[in-house]
Image: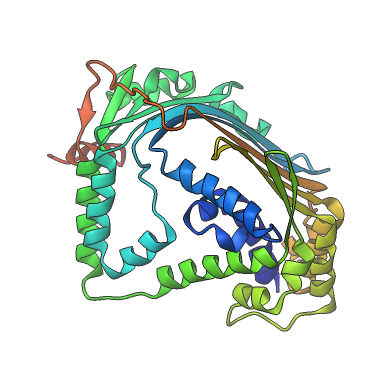
Amino acid sequence: MKSRLLALCMMFVLIAAIVPGVMAQSANPVCGNLSADDCTALTTAFTNTGSAGSGAFTLAATFDVQSDDATQAGKVDITADGKFSGVPPMMSMTDMTAMSADPSAALTKFTETLKGFSGELNLTVGLPTSAAAMTGGEPLTLNLLLVNGIGYIDLSKLPASIAPMLEQMKLPKGWAGLDLIDTATNLGGMMTASAGDATSTAPTTATEDMAKAGDLAAKYLTYTHDGDTYTGTLDLAGLANDPDFQALAKSAETKPMTAEDQAAIDSLKDATVQVAFTVTDAKLSEAKVTVNIPGSTLTAIDAASASSDSSSDAATTVPPTAVNVSIDLKYSGLGEAQTVTAPADAPVAKYADLMTLFGGMMGGGTSG
């Protein structure tokens, strides 16, 4: 039953995290209790945002695991800003399904999308104490560019602690690029060749399960509408008790549900998953996701896991006192021209260069 509870928890976080993306692709299932007019207004905003073709954004996110055991506690703060022009090279659920059926066609579509997209992302990650030593106690800073199918990174902004490794790899101290189209083409070709005539239903099944989870979530999503903001709250306990949802989380090895399992699921009434969307000029201007799982819920989940796991590790595990996740994404200048320029004189590596580099790191080396 431990796997089922973990699957349920992961699904809740995934649902919260992918709600904006799901709405942009298939909006109606997550309209919840919205009226027809409100549903149309909100889904139109997502459609317009997804088709804007250019814009700027900021992101602030926090992942906070609180625990009386310092070794299990951790907090990650992420801030980012950037801009884009063109359709982002992201794969929809339909694309993922198509990839399993025709990898070659999916690869072609992906590389063509790469050619038509330019983007800039400046990311700062505040690491938990346990990992901060890797960056000398400083946040991890990543400055990334994507222009004409080439991805660039400013290596000078990486932690000083890894400078010796970069020097050993003979990488530049400033901007460096990788031809993503060449790399994806080579890797994709290898994957297509290795796949041969083999077929797999796993990608299709996973895609179908995510779509089903979205449809089920709509039954337990209740919105309030205040001005231009739509705030939705997901009834986690109701969703987790839904037989159809539970069926999605089951596996062949799953044992029958116990009293501890049911208590853990019922404890989800104290946890919250909330989304908030603000619409401006028929476009999305802000999307917020908040997930709060209190200690009482985590303790109940831990008890259910321990009841089905007799290992000593399960008996000594101390559950977190709280898990909190917040994501705040803001858009601006949607539909307005954005300029993203490749860094001057930055060296650009090809797939073969990358393999040579990896070979050298592993001590084998290649001749290119």
Query: For the point 50% across and 51% down, which residue is it?
Result: 24
Quadrant for the N terminus in the image? bottom right
Colour scheme of the rendered structure: rainbow
Residue in the foreground of this view, choosing between 333 and 125: 333
- The residue positioned 35% from the left and 45% from the top of the image is 89
| In-image side of 362 versus 38 (left or right) | left
Task: Please give the name of the residue rendered at 59% of the width and 49% of the height, measured from the top-left corner.
Answer: 41
Foreground: 277 or 269? 277
> Picture coordinates of residue 81 (x, y %)?
51, 26
Residue 132 appears in view: yes
Q: Quadrant of residue 162?
A: top left
Measured from the top left, where is residue 77 in percent x and y? Answer: 64, 32
Q: Residue at x 70, y 79 (%)?
A: 243
Q: x%, y% of residue 11? A: 63, 61
Residue 60 appears in which quarter of the rendering?
A: top right
Q: Is residue 134 above or below residue 34?
A: above
- Whether residue 53 sits left or right of residue 179 in the image: it is right
* Residue 199 against residue 158 in the figure, above or below: below
- In screen coordinates, is 320 left or right of 212? right
Asked whether 284 or 162 is in front, the reply is: 284
